[in-house]
Image (cartoon, helix red, strand yellow):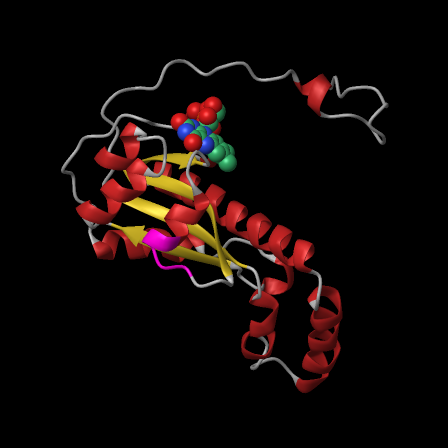
Amino acid sequence: MKFSEVVQQRRTVKSYQPGKEISDAELKELMQEVVLSPSSFNLQHWTFIAVKDAAIKEKIQQAAWNQEQIGTCSILLVVCGKVDAHQDAPEIYRDVPATVQDMVLPMIKNFYDGKHQLQRDEAIRSASLAAMTLMLAAHNRGWATAPMIGFDPEAVTKLVKLQSNYIPVMLMALGYKKKEPRPRDHRWPIEEVVKMNTLDGPGLTG
Ligand SMILES: Cc1cc2nc3c(=O)[nH]c(=O)nc-3n(C[C@H](O)[C@H](O)[C@H](O)COP(=O)(O)O)c2cc1C
């Protein structure tokens, strides 16, 4: 599939064929593309909990406005962000030349240490970029997805046993589409969302 077709055709799908299996091997192939997503300093703040267990899925569904797609999708992914990912830098950079380590590691430490809001922002940024890759890569493989923020984060944290250095960034249904979603809703025209040079500049007209 052409990349522009993937982008244009991807939709949030809420109606899935229940009981359809996506194997661990298939999921692994998908995730091998997802982990190629960019992240600041290559810290890869993401972790994905792949929930297939029906009982856990049902409990998450209850903690997520009982959204239908959670019950019927093949795999529910809890897209998580690791807020202290900067502490992994020595391991991530262990194979680079010492000169690079000496430059980058103190830079990362200074940038993140003690800055809890920034650490959280970064975890959400990176996990969200990976989630976008996931949606596009899944569509390319013939699967449908639905990103979700409509859930109780404390309940989901407990259900999938996240430690305190992880936050649930979004839920992601993954499965086989049953019904087409309704036609796309409103999108702002480009000239309203792309401004030249400053926010009060002219809109892009092309
Ligand atoms: C971060 C995020 C959270 C979302 N949360 C929900 C949700 O909880 N439930 C839902 O049905 N859709 C959710 N959506 C899907 C949006 O409603 C959908 O992306 C938007 O209407 C545009 O439609 P499209 O994805 O089909 O282009 C979410 C999307 C994003 C990006």
Image quarter where the N terminus lies is: top left
Q: Which is the main secondary structure of the residues drawn in magenta?
A: loop
In the displayed image of the protein, which residue is found farthest to the bottom? 98
Magenta residue check for 160 = yes
Give x and y (percent) for residue 36.
48, 56
Which residue is drawn at the image coordinates 66% and 59% (left, top)?
A: 116
Image quarter where the C terminus lies is: top right
In this rendered view, identify the residue nearer to me: 47 or 32. Answer: 47
In the picture, residue 139 is in which quadrant? top left
Above-or-below relation of 108 to 167: below
Residue span colored magenta:
158-162
Give x and y (percent) for residue 32.
38, 57
Give x and y (percent) for residue 92.
55, 74
Q: Is residue 150 left or right of residue 96?
A: left
In this rendered view, identify the residue nearer to me: 75 or 137. Answer: 75
In the displayed image of the protein, which residue is found farthest to the left? 19
Which residue is drawn at the image coordinates 75% and 21% (left, top)?
A: 204
For the question of whether residue 143 can be seen, the reply is no
For the question of whether residue 92 can be seen, the reply is yes
In the picture, residue 123 is in which quadrant? bottom right
Give x and y (percent) for residue 137.
40, 43
Q: Is residue 183 left or right of residue 121?
A: left
Magenta residue check for 123 = no
Which residue is drawn at the image coordinates 31% and 55% (left, top)?
A: 29
In the picture, residue 10 is in which quadrant? top left
Above-or-below relation of 172 to 124: above
